[in-house]
Image (cartoon, grey):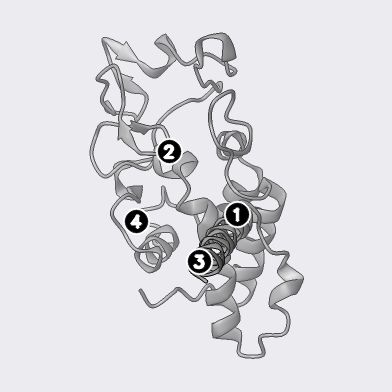
Amino acid sequence: MKTTMKTKRFFLAALLAFCGIAAAQQQQASNNTLKPVSEFDKIADKQERAIALFTEAGKVINSPRCLNCHPAGDRPTQTNALNPHQPWVVRGADGSGAAAMRCATCHQAANYDNARMPGHPTWHLAPASMAWQGRTLGQICEQIKDKSRNDNMDMAKLVHHMAEDTLVGWGWNPGAGRTPAPGTQKEFGALIKAWAEAGAFCPRS
């Protein structure tokens, strides 16, 4: 009897562990993909549809690939843990580093995987007015619509920036050792465009 009970407990524990792992894997897979715009067509209320679209796009906005270049201070962060940039560098007057340590000193026109060095021809930080780290998705949403904080972009320019800008696109091609942003830039751009067309309403939090 005792052996039977122990066996049942063992199999129950193993089953629970398996279910937990499977759920975690399913959640991770969900976080690594983006739903198509068509998934939100069934939401009749325009405001709720816009909020749902932006929330889905928020998987990209809140990914390390975006947040690292939208730091709360003047020092960029790196890795999925948003660790302070090593070596110590600062934003500088134009977002491309201080005079003695420009971003382009290390970050070349393309990723250099042998040294795990990310690269792009215009590598730089987002403007300080566009800091995202430490903000809720709703706050970021209001922020990116504000022309006084978003580098004077109207909605059309904002959609183009998200969907077409190649530095934004680097987030899906970040080089060796880095997790790409969820989905694709095309899918992300489509979500942002649909959000704008639905009224560009923002999440409440």
Checking the image for residue 148, the label placed there is: 4
- Write the residue at 73% across / 64% down: 36
Residue at the (24%, 19%) spot, across then down: 88
Q: Which amino acid does label 1 sit on?
A: Gln
What secondary structure is found at the residue carrying circle 3? helix
Q: Which of marks 1 and 2 is in front?
A: 1
Question: Which residue sits at x=35%, y=30%?
Answer: 95
In which quadrant of the rendered view does residue 104 lie?
Answer: top left
Residue 25 got which mark? Answer: 1
Labelled disc at residue 80: 2
- In the image, taking residue 104 as reference, residue 38 lies left or right, namely right
Q: State the residue in front, 136 or 22.
A: 22
Compare marks 1 and 2 and give the one earlier in the sequence: 1
First in sequence: mark 4 vs mark 3: 3
Which percent across, then down, holds residue 194?
66, 68
Disc count in the image? 4
Q: Helix, strand or loop at disc 1? A: helix
Q: What separation in Å lies between label 2 and label 4 (alpha carbons)?
A: 30 Å
Q: Residue 9 carries which label?
A: 3
Say which label, 1 or 3, has the lower sequence index: 3
Quadrant position of residue 191: bottom right
Mark 3 or 2, which is nearer the eye? Answer: 3
Residue farthest along the bottom direction in this orientation: 44
How far is the residue under mark 3 from the one under mark 2?
38 Å
What SS does tag 2 mark?
Answer: loop
Quadrant where the image shows the C terminus: bottom left
